[in-house]
Amino acid sequence: MKDTPLAIVAAGMVTGVGLDAPASCAAIRAGLDNFQETRFVDAGGEALLGCEVPLAPTGDKQATLLAMALEECAQAAGVALETVPVLLCLSERERPGRADGHAEHLLAQLQRELGRSLHAASALIQHGRVGAAVALRQARQLIYEQRVGQVIVAAVDSLLDEPALRAYEQQRRLLTSGNGDGFIPGEAASAVLVARPAAGGQAQLLCLGLGYGVEPSPIGSGRPLRADGLVKAIQDALAAAGRPIDAMDFRLVDVSGEHYWFKESSLALLRTLRQPKEPFDIWHPADCVGEVGAAIGPLMLAVAKAACEGGYSAGDNILCHFSNLDGRRAAAVLSFQALRSH
């Protein structure tokens, strides 16, 4: 990917801690959350904590959140939304609690919210938390092979759903009064516009490398975890970017609550970083917005962009990684830099 970098040009976001990208990123920077008791109760009769977007319901909430994020992103980039392909990342088809026909219904509701159709080259990417990395690969193909000028990578998801919460509670994956090793459910929509980097001028956040892998010991499998899938994804992303891991300044990851994900991240670091590196910060926005499923991917990219442009990041080179329940893993190498004119 050395010769096909993607610039992250603009962002939009709606989360439980902010109704746009600047507000959400400021809250995440400050470590604020909006974890409150929800209308859902656990098996012990206690209210479940969640991070809900504070909007009055006016139809399909996910479609509303997504429309807000898309319009903010397009406006920030100064483009008409209908002129840009949207690669829409959603939860996995087999995700607990997901209704049949969810994607088709959401797409119809979204276009009704927007009052227009999406670009003809738009596509659905139903791969959960790794979806953003899959979408970035597809965006790169559209931009460099099909000569599309720019692409929006967007996502929406919500785990504040009765069937999903019941399934996760039965699997002992939800934070409840009877389980301390679980996640807090949330909901969010996020979007980033990507394009070819602009040569010269100011620094811009670039995606330099992508990598993918499959973990043979996914959560709940009972098999010993070695983080093989995440190690492969990280190594491939670094190789594609032409950067060693010790050139990375910090990590931005999708881990949320459960011990398994933190253990996997730690094992992957131990197996890829050969020399001690201090400090090597790890940022996990789910601490503020909760587990937001597929929406975490573009959200992480927006957080990285805001941190680099705002001068409060832990460095210019960022390692991102993403993990799915089914074992799929992905990683991305980001760098905040200016490209020289040739």
Image (cartoon, rainbow, N blue to C red):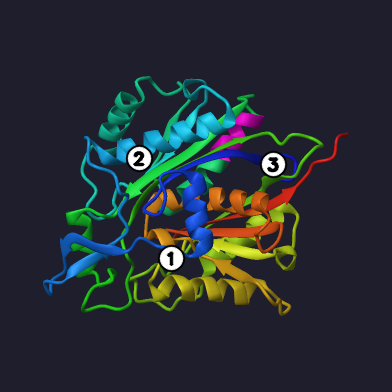
Which numbered tag is attached to residue 287?
Answer: 1
Residue 272 x/y as whole percent: 65, 71
Residue 88 x/y as whole percent: 42, 37
The image quadrant that residue 123 belongs to is top left
Q: Which residue corresponds to mark 2?
A: 65
Majority secondary structure in the magenta region? helix
Label 1 and label 2: CA atoms lie apart by 20 Å
Q: What residue sits 77% from the left and 41% below the top?
A: 202
Which of 220 and 290 lies nearest the eye of the viewer?
Answer: 290
Give the left or right position of residue 64, taking residue 147 as reference: left
Which part of the image, by quadrant, shows the C terminus? top right
> Looking at this rendering, what residue extends furthest in the right direction?
342
Q: Amino acid at mark 2?
A: Leu
Please check the rendered image and state whether residue 140 is part of the magenta-colored stretch, yes or no: yes
Q: Amino acid at mark 3?
A: Pro
Question: In the structure shown, which secondary structural element does the residue marked by tag 1 occupy?
Answer: helix
Q: Are marks 3 and 1 in contact (CB under 8 Å)?
A: no
Label 3 and label 1: CA atoms lie apart by 30 Å
Question: In the structure shown, which secondary structural element does the residue marked by tag 2 occupy?
Answer: helix
Give the left or right position of residue 196, taking residue 286 as reference: right
Q: Give the class, few, some or many, for how many residues have Cα within 10 Å of label 3's Cα (few <14, many ≥20).
A: many
Region of the chain picked out in magenta, as a range:
137-144
Which part of the image, by quadrant, shows the N terminus? top right
Q: Amino acid at mark 1?
A: Asp
Which numbered tag is attached to residue 5?
Answer: 3
Residue 179 x/y as whole percent: 26, 78
